[in-house]
Image (cartoon, rainbow, N blue to C red):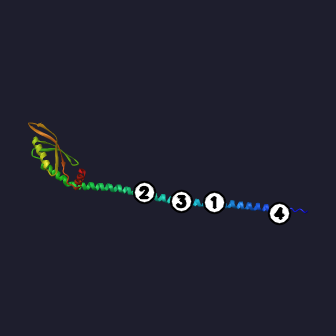
Amino acid sequence: MPRINLLPWREEQRKERQKNFLISAAGAVLTGMVTIMLVFWTYDRFIKYQNMRNGILDTEIALLDEKIEKIKGLEREKERLIARMEIIEQLQTSRPEVVHLFDEMVHTLPNGVYLTSLKQVARRLEIKGVAESTTRVSAYMRNIDVSEWLENPGLQVIETVEVGSKKNAEFSLTAQQVSTSEDEDELDGAATL
């Protein structure tokens, strides 16, 4: 019986398969590496693009922060100017009140009384003076009470002092200046509610 050797054919087929497998494996590895490189490159591009956008946003945010600080500075300046304008307006409206106050101080002062000191804190007046008698101090307080520019007289101290052969009454009293400005009247009305 003749023997047929099929081994070389099978051996060649096995070598061919092994060669094809190695080529396929190398192609798969190469394709995988190219795919991984493309994925990394794509993600790197996305990250760079997002970082560029973030940089632009950071720059714009910094510019807006500067503008906000300028606006806040302008608002503070505006508040200071408004406060100054209000003070000037109050001074303008109270300017005639000073004239009326001094005029009223002269008209309420009876004969035999003279003032040594006059101090004003807000609307409160502290008046010090000398009178020929205590009745003249009482008359002065009545004059203040009926005055249209002064109100609420209150005697703090009165004492009799001898000056030579005369006796004088040194006194200290307080009074309130009447407000005529509309703003203060509204504030007083709101405070009493």
For label 3, the SS is: helix
Which of the labelled discs sits on residue 9, or is there none?
A: 4
- Badge 2 or badge 1: first in the primary sequence: 1
* Residue underneath mark 3: 50
Q: Is residue 185 left or right of residue 112?
A: right
Q: Kindly indicate whether the residue at mark 1 contacts the one at mark 4 (C-beta within 8 angstroms).
A: no
Question: Nearer the observer, disc 2 or disc 3?
Answer: 3
Helix, strand or loop at mark 1? helix
Do the residues bearing badges 2 and 1 touch, measured as CB atoms within 8 Å? no
Q: Quadrant of residue 83?
A: bottom left
In the rendered image, the residue lying farthest to the right is 1
Query: Could you tell which of marks 4 and 3 lies nearer the N-terminus?
Result: 4
Left or right side of 146 for 18: right
Q: In the rendering, at what x and y percent does residue 132 appear?
A: 10, 41
Q: Position of residue 158 (x, y in %)?
A: 14, 39
Secondary structure, mark 4, is: helix
Residue found at x 27% / y 55%: 86
Q: Residue at x 60, y 60 (%)?
A: 41
